[in-house]
Image (cartoon, rainbow, N blue to C red):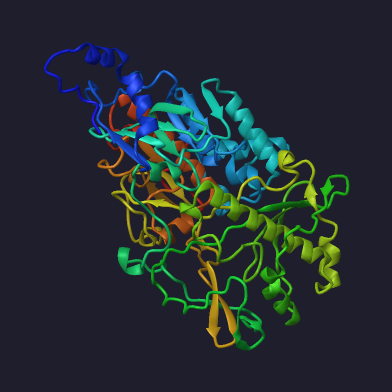
Amino acid sequence: MSLNKYPLKKRTAKYLLIKEIGLKFIFTLIIVIISCRKTHIIKLENTGSGLDTLQQLPSNAIKTDVVIYGATSSGVIAAIEAARLGKNVILIATDQYIGGMTTGGLCKTDIVDSGVNIGGLTHDFYLKVAAKYAERVPSYTFEPKIALQVFNEFLNSYPNIQIFRNERLSLKNSVIKDAESKRIVMITMESGKIFGAKEYIDASYEGDLLAHAGVSYTVGREDNSKYNESYNGARLPIIFPVKVSPYFTDSDPSSGLLQRVNGSAISAPGTGDNKIMAYNYRICLTNDPTDTISITKPDNLNMKDFEIMFRMLKQQYNVFLGWHKIKNNKLDVNSANYFSTDYVGINSLYPEATYDERDSIKRRIENYDRGLIWLIQNDPRISPKIQKFYKNFGLPKDEFVQNNGWPTQLYVREARRMISEYVITDNYILNKGHVNDPIALGTYPMDSHLIQYGIAVPGRLEGEGQMFIDRNRAYGISFRALVPRQSECTNLAVSICVSASHSAFCSLRTEPTYMVMGQSAAAAAVLAINQKCKIQNVDYIKLRDQLISEHQYLQPNQGN
């Protein structure tokens, strides 16, 4: 579709009226009548270099310098960085909460080497968290409410940040892009709100903005042969520590399979597929009797979901929750190996699902996780010793207050991943490569949770997808992994769903790494505005110097 001048040989009254209405009306009309494609490409008039389109937005558009989609921890840090560099910022939260997993349940931060390679605003955040506990060194273990308090104080100190809550991209025609410059002109929400900016940052866990903007991406695991990797694709399955029959009736294949067991043969190690690691909720529990909300039996508890656990119990195996002590008599409950809070085998469709479908998956995982803890606390098949320990724990009244003590963020461990000119691979993570444009450091081992249950040998259950490759050394993250191909979009940076293979992303996928990438993405966006250039063409030396001046680490610090 073109917005070029109408090909009329003479200026009729009808033509003059249309011209007088102008481009603003046409933009509004486009939103209503264009086709069902996620990205709509238009050609703008009189834009020169294509870098100044804000003046041509419809009158009801909310305009700013930088729009950040996704109020995750990465999005919050990106907003603070852009704001303190003098730009007006809109931070869009897809629900009512901010901070993602950092405020939504992940209370024990994934770090190595005591965080010596975590710098910049991310280091400042953990230092501010520590100060709330009268500690003088960064605290990587904390209560969710304290992380939320620190983020809110951070954001409130910058009046040039506007936060819009409960705003999600429209699933139809959400992104308008200029055909010539490949710039996002504006984005539209389900509510009808229109946002226009000079630069955009996708800081969502799902990569929704990059997908709707027509940027290349992938979901799932690449074959090892694609990037000549060693740890991508299917993994060598792990055999359960005790014998568990995968069949509905023990040792009877004709009875059918247990819930969520894949009856197909597990692919050979290194084989690609569309599967992703399991999700869960990082549940905060407390045994403070004055601060406890009891976990009750879910109304629609599906006991078939827990048959694997009960069969393991019969074999004297009873470790089904992984937990870490945090502050003030609270636990951060995560998944343990084999069978735990990870709802294995049901989330591979989540990244590309509609919002209603995602909400359904979230409810299923919450129902499962609540049911697991309730059973551990109440089912007579659980050993008395374990029940006695967990019976005293419940959801904390002083956490996630608006959500009745339940965590506010589903742990989306991986979803979409951008495919850019540069793709981070596990070869690079394992120090077989080098980049000359680092903008932050990755620090964590390659850590993947289970992806599916399968049948190891006739009559025995196995799990597939898990790995923990501990490299224990920081590495530089290339700027090119945060920006799309120039041919696809020139004013978008990505701070979570970056350009990386599945195996490499298993190292990148931690909250501190998301946060440092958020700061660097925002610094690049501001530089692109100031230099009036495509984000891919920012002066890297200036970007590097800016980040170093803000104590962002680009080279491994001592301790590695």
Outermost residue, left direction?
9
Vertical arrangement, residue 170 with respect to residue 362, above or below: above
Q: Nearer the viewer, residue 45 or 128?
A: 45
Report which quarter residue 539 is drawn in: top left
Asked if residue 480 shows in the view, the reply is: yes
Q: Is residue 87 left or right of residue 485?
A: right
Q: Is residue 155 left or right of residue 526?
A: right
Asked if residue 545 shows in the view, the reply is: no
Query: What x and y, as percent, mark residue 508?
Result: 47, 53
Q: Nearer the viewer, residue 172 or 288?
A: 172
Residue visible at 17% across and 12% down?
A: 11
Query: What x and y, as percent, mark residue 514?
Result: 50, 45
Q: Nearer the viewer, residue 115 or 148?
A: 148
Q: Quadrant of the N terminus?
A: top left
Query: What x and y, as percent, mark residue 411?
Result: 59, 52
Q: Nearer the viewer, residue 515 or 492?
A: 492
Vertical arrangement, residue 8 with respect to residue 343, above or below: above
Residue visible at 37% across and 37% down?
A: 492
Vertical arrangement, residue 50 with respect to residue 120, above or below: above
Query: What x and y, as percent, mark residue 461?
Result: 59, 80
